């Protein structure tokens, strides 16, 4: 286990943000793992509480993540964001959005979607009531815009 951890830390020294996020174990870490790492004074890894805020509603998610002294603060944040993405958050260059707001800007209900561009329900995914849709036929006569 500790060999694996050192190997991981070495890899992370030159990893991209994406690789860094992917290589770290998912949070929250088991207490046994945290204490093992804390006992190992050679390890660059340490648990750190990272708080991510939803840009839309301000909801916060605070957890202990295993980060490395070799990481930049942006990379450390990315560790948390990668975990939250797996939980349904949307964390990208536009900001951080909780599960409730993750899809508010980009994901629309897929009811009535056809091969025609822009067709289908114009409401956001997960709208209420779920069985009432507002469907448009799409951009069938908008060739001039292209
Ligand atoms: Zn939110
Ligand atoms: Zn709909």
Image (cartoon, grey):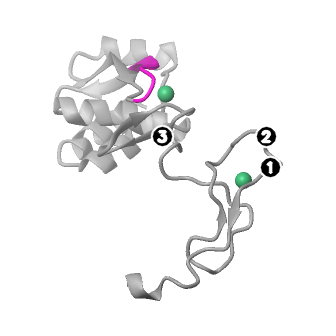
Return the residue at label 2: 129
How crowded is the residue under tag 3: few (<14 C-alpha within 10 Å), some, or many (20+)?
A: some
The disc, 2 or 3, on the residue closer to the chain's N-terminal end is 3
Disc number for residue 76: none
8 or 96: which is nearer to us? Answer: 96
Residue 136, image x and y in percent? Answer: 66, 67
Distance between mark 2 and mark 3 Cα atoms:
26 Å
Distance between mark 3 and mark 1 Cα atoms:
29 Å
How crowded is the residue under tag 2: few (<14 C-alpha within 10 Å), some, or many (20+)?
A: few
Q: Are marks 2 and 3 in contact (CB under 8 Å)?
A: no
How many marks on residues? Answer: 3
Q: Which residues are magenta?
A: 56-64
Assign a secondary structure to mark 2: loop
Q: Of discs 2 and 3, which sits in the foreground?
A: 2
Assign a secondary structure to mark 1: loop
| Residue 25 in sight from this viewpoint | no
111 or 92: which is nearer to us? Answer: 111
Q: Which residue occupies 68% across, 76% down? A: 114
Return the residue at label 3: 85
Residue 6, image x and y in percent? Answer: 29, 35
Return the residue at label 1: 132
Assign a secondary structure to mark 3: helix
Question: Does 112 appear in magenta?
Answer: no
In the displayed image of the protein, which residue is found farthest to the right? 131
Question: Does 59 appear in magenta?
Answer: yes
Q: Of discs 3 and 1, which sits in the foreground?
A: 1
The disc, 3 or 1, on the residue closer to the chain's N-terminal end is 3
Q: Which residue occupies 41% across, 39% down? A: 82
Q: Is the residue indicated by label 1 positioned so its CB lies within 8 Å of ligand 2? A: yes
């Amino acid at each position: 286990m500790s060999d694996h951890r050192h190997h991981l830390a070495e890899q992370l020294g030159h990893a991209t943000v994406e690789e860094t996020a992917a290589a770290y174990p998912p949070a929250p870490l088991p207490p046994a793992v945290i204490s093992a790492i804390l006992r190992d004074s050679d390890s660059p890894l340490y648990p750190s509480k990272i708080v991510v805020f939803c840009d839309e509603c301000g909801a916060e998610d605070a957890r202990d993540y295993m980060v490395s002294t070799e990481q930049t603060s942006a990379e450390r944040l990315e560790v948390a964001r990668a975990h939250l993405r797996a939980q349904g958050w949307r964390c990208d260059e536009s900001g951080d959005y909780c599960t409730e707001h993750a899809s508010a800007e980009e994901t629309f209900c897929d009811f009535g979607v056809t091969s025609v561009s822009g067709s289908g329900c114009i409401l956001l995914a997960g709208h209420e009531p779920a069985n009432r849709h507002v469907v448009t036929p799409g951009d069938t006569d908008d060739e001039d815009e292209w």
